[in-house]
Amino acid sequence: MKKIKKIKIRINGKSKTIKEKTSIEKLVNILKIPIKKVAIELNQEIIDKKRMNKIFLKQNDNIEIVHFIGGG
């Protein structure tokens, strides 16, 4: 049986362990985040939502997910 490798990342300051080779798109789906209402930053760089399925997370990556809130 093949052992699944795990990596540690930080999401909004909290440590989380995920499977190696997880894309940002998959992480967003796992966390059930409504993609149209957030901005995602990976290691202090804003991610283009069109490329989320091509960007794979690595050990110690730091992700910030910011929700948009309307107001006036």
Image (cartoon, rainbow, N blue to C red):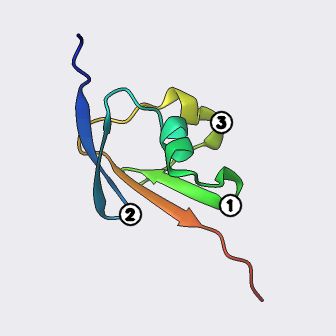
In three-dimensional space, the C-alpha distance between marks 2 and 1, rounded to whole angstroms, equals 16 Å
Q: Which quarter of the figure is the C terminus placed in?
A: bottom right
Residue 46 numbered tag: none
Q: Which residue is mark 1?
A: 37
**Mark 2 element type:** loop
Q: In the displayed orientation, state which residue is furthest to the bottom.
A: 72
User: Percent from the top left, x then y, of residue 44?
Assistant: 39, 55
User: Percent from the top left, x then y, of residue 62?
Assistant: 33, 52
In three-dimensional space, the C-alpha distance between marks 1 and 3, rounded to whole angstroms, equals 15 Å
Badge 2: residue crowd in 10 Å (few <14, some 14–19, many ≥20): few
Whichever of callouts 2 and 1 sits on the residue coming sooner in the sequence is 2
Q: Is residue 68 left or right of residue 60?
A: right
Q: Which residue is mark 3?
A: 50
Q: Is residue 20 left or right of residue 24?
A: left
In three-dimensional space, the C-alpha distance between marks 2 and 3, rounded to whole angstroms, equals 21 Å
Residue at 65 percent of width and 36 percent of height: 50
Residue at 30 percent of width and 45 percent of height: 61
Q: Is residue 36 left or right of residue 45?
A: right
Whichever of callouts 2 and 3 sits on the residue coming sooner in the sequence is 2
Q: Amino acid at mark 1?
A: Lys
Whichever of callouts 1 and 3 sits on the residue coming sooner in the sequence is 1
Viewer-side label of 1, 3:
1
Q: Is residue 70 left or right of residue 58?
A: right
Q: Which residue is mark 2?
A: 12
Badge 1: residue crowd in 10 Å (few <14, some 14–19, many ≥20): few
**Mark 3 element type:** helix
Please, is residue 14 above or below residue 6 in the view? Answer: below
**Mark 1 element type:** helix
Q: Amino acid at mark 3?
A: Lys
User: Percent from the top left, x then y, of residue 57?
Assistant: 37, 36
Q: Amino acid at mark 2?
A: Asn
User: Percent from the top left, x then y, of residue 41?
Assistant: 47, 53
